[in-house]
Image (cartoon, grey):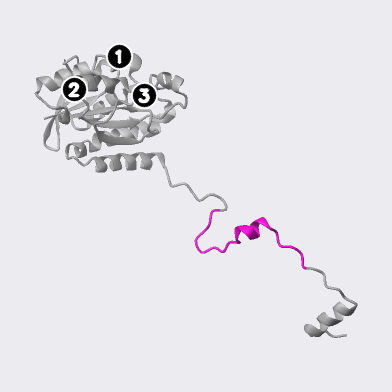
Amino acid sequence: MLLFAGLGNPGAKYANNRHNVGFMAADAIARRHSFSPWSKKFQGLIAEGALAGEKIILIKPQTFMNNSGQSIGEALRFYKLTPSALTVFYDEIDLADGKVRVKTGGGAGGHNGIRSIDGHVGNAYRRVRIGVGHPGVKEFVQHHVLGDFAKADREWVEPLLDAIGDHADLIVRGDEAGFMNKVSVAVQRKTGVVPKPEKPGQKQQGAKQQSHVRQARPQQPAVKLPETGPMAAMLKKLFGGKD
């Protein structure tokens, strides 16, 4: 048995917040794999199902983000599970929009939900970090994460959540790299992300280029040779000139 937890804040007011992308991920998994209806337990909402032949308990803590550890800790103790059986899905401002990274252990990185879980069960659990981007200024972070996804964001949010639901079994199988790759490919396919073209002036394969010295120094005009006098006569004699 494994416990999958999606983090967020309860209530319609927060439903579409960036901070609630963990709840959204849990909902996507439940839908895709026909989990049981959500029911109240452990100060949260839980749904039961299976992935890759393993029983999974999905939980969405209803204690508000900053106290997520209360609900998750209670569930782990009830099922007699160790932190290694826990996977947490949550928003990460230090990742670009639509990027997903999976790791086990580590610090809270300023995320209050993770800090709460660490305080209740330790940090030896798997984290699925879902990038929601950074506003660029520290003072705007709270407004950013507690703000709703913009309409334009749905272009990458929807395929990302679908891919998390489709490929959650890879996490159970321990194929974290495969999971991250599947999600990345799904987001790129839907958003049309392609490699950046070469910059103007960038060296093309097989193309001849002048050296940087030649580019920096335009070719100087030829020196005009004397037409009369002793010097002219000597040069004509050397190079075969005629009188």
Secondary structure beneath dot 1 equals loop
Circle 3 residue? 18
N-terminal of the pair, mark 3 or mark 1, is 1
Amino acid under disc 3 = Arg
Q: Tell me the quadrant of the picture where the C terminus can be found.
A: bottom right
Circle 1 residue? 11
Q: State the residue in front, 221 or 140.
A: 221
x and y, in percent, of residue 210 in the image: 61, 61
Q: Which residues are magenta?
A: 202-222
Residue depicted at 77% across the width and 68% down the height: 222
Secondary structure beneath dot 2 equals helix
N-terminal of the pair, mark 1 or mark 2, is 1
C-beta proximity under 8 Å, tags 1 and 2 = no
Asked if residue 221 is positioned above or below residue 236 in the image, the reply reads above
Residue depicted at 24% across the width and 40% down the height: 176
Secondary structure predominantly adopted by residues drawn in magenta: loop
Q: Residue furthest right?
A: 229
C-beta proximity under 8 Å, tags 2 and 3 = no
Q: Residue 152: which quarter of the image?
A: top left
Q: Disc 3 and disc 1: Cα gap in Å? A: 14 Å
Amino acid under disc 1 = Gly
Tag 2: Cα neighbours inside 10 Å, few (<14), some, or many (≥20)?
some
Q: Disc 2 and disc 3: Cα gap in Å? A: 25 Å
Res. 118 mark: none
The question of residue 90 being in magenta is answered with: no
x and y, in percent, of residue 162 in the image: 29, 34
C-beta proximity under 8 Å, tags 3 and 1 = no
Q: Residue 214: which quarter of the image?
A: bottom right
x and y, in percent, of residue 19 in the image: 34, 22
Circle 2 residue? 121
